[in-house]
Amino acid sequence: MKKGSTIELITVITLIILLAMISFIGIYTKDKNAYRNIVKDYNYGMDLSDYISIKYEPEGETDYEKCKNIFEERLESYGVPQYYLRQDAESGEIVLDISNDAGVANILEYLAYEGRFEIKDSESDDILMDNSHLDSSRVLYTSDEYGQGTIIYVDITFTKEGKQKLSEISEKYTEESETKVTFYLDDQELMSTAFASKRTDGKMQFSMGSASTNSNTLQGYVIQATNIATLLDNGQMPIKYTMSTSRNVESSINSVTLGYISSACAFMLVLVSIGIMAKYKFKGVISVYIVIGFIAALLLTIRYTNTVVTIEGWYAIAISVILQIICVLSILNNKYNLKTFTIRMTPLIIIYIVFCFMSWTSLSSFGTIMFWSTILMFLTNTLLEREIRA
């Protein structure tokens, strides 16, 4: 082996060892009186982690299917990655299984709200505008007039008809008039105001609390604003639902079981690695390092691409490692051909990409992991071929 190739090989092995340490052990920093691993954790699917099961019951009889659709739209607006929603067609009862992630508790009650938006005359209680005039809403922030604090607010855009209606209301309910307009959401007052000038832009804003520099306070305002914007954005439910029961459901496969399975797989991998090194000597040692690097890179990729890991996802990881070992043995026996590998894997990559965008979490998890593993196989096998041929 040439001197340049030796230096390159040492560099590659050093980088693989570093990558493996980060992936398998982590990076620990001191946080107050304890050490915390700052490497991102896995995003487990509901079949591998605990989840919450909530039952919602309707207060009336009407279009249950529409209510279910609004539930789903609200969940999508909140960006909930994993949930399973089902409805009894006769009773209208809805059961929601949702991953027990941070922030979920803040939305469970709001999911069942009617989302009834009204602008009323503060004296006569006449309804001036309602949900039919809404176009969209979003959560924004700005600095206060002194530039020292942050204000969180909901920005509402009205439809063409709503824009005209708002313009008429702003001309009537001025600061000089005795009557104001009051904004309501499910009978809860959001804001009461009069207009300093005619509104022609078809927009309204109302802030959450006052300007603040405290991160916890601002986060609370963001949660409030997000809940309001989500209700406004996804329409009014025909009837009100109430959350009747809520229970935590433990996964049938817990972390201890996963630990046993992972340990068994690691033990088998060690045996295979010993066999490869015993048969192929120095080239076998290089190959084992490449396999370790492949596994470490795959696990980090899964974590930092926020891939949901389900049982099928674990199958994909196991299959990927087996395929990588087969490729390594093909290279060691001079039977590996990059062009042939690419041609054979291209149709599979297309299938994996299709799986990635499917709503079925199990299939999406499998496809996403297989996609990334195939890309990493291509890179690591090219590197291995280069090093053992040097």
Image (spheres, rainbow, N blue to C red):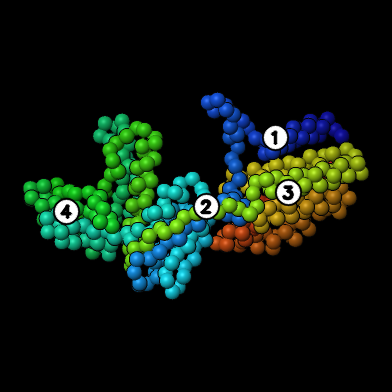
Residue 261 numbered tag: 3
- Sort mark 3 into few (<14), some (14-19) or many (20+) by Cα contacts within 10 Å: few
The secondary element bearing badge 1 is classed as helix
Say what amino acid the circle numbered 3 marks.
Ile
Label 4: few (<14), some (14–19) or many (≥20) C-alpha neighbours in 10 Å: many
**Nearer to the camera, 250 or 363:** 250
Residue at the spot 55% in from the left edge and 25% down from the top edge: 33
Identity of the residue drawn at 82% across and 32% down: 6
- Residue sitting farthest toward the right: 279
Of marks 4 and 2, the one in the foreground: 2
Dot 4 lies on which element? strand
State which quadrant residue 133 falls in. bottom left
* Crowd class of label 2 (few under 14; some 14 to 19; many from 20; radius 10 Å): some
Gap in angstroms between the C-alphas marked 3 and 1 = 21 Å
How many marks the image carries: the answer is 4
Q: In this rendering, would 267 be left or right of 18?
A: right
Name the residue carrying label 1: 21
Rendering coords of residue 381 (x, y %): 77, 47
Quarter that holds the N terminus:
top right
Q: Nearer the viewer, mark 3 or mark 4?
A: 3
Question: In the rendering, which numbered label is found on residue 248?
Answer: 2
Q: Give the residue furthest to the top.
A: 33
* Residue identified by numbered label 4: 181
Image depth: mark 3 or mark 2 in front: 2
Looking at this view, is 161 or 49 the one in front?
49
Q: Quadrant of the C terminus?
A: top right
Give the mark, 2 or 1, whose residue is nearer the N terminus. 1
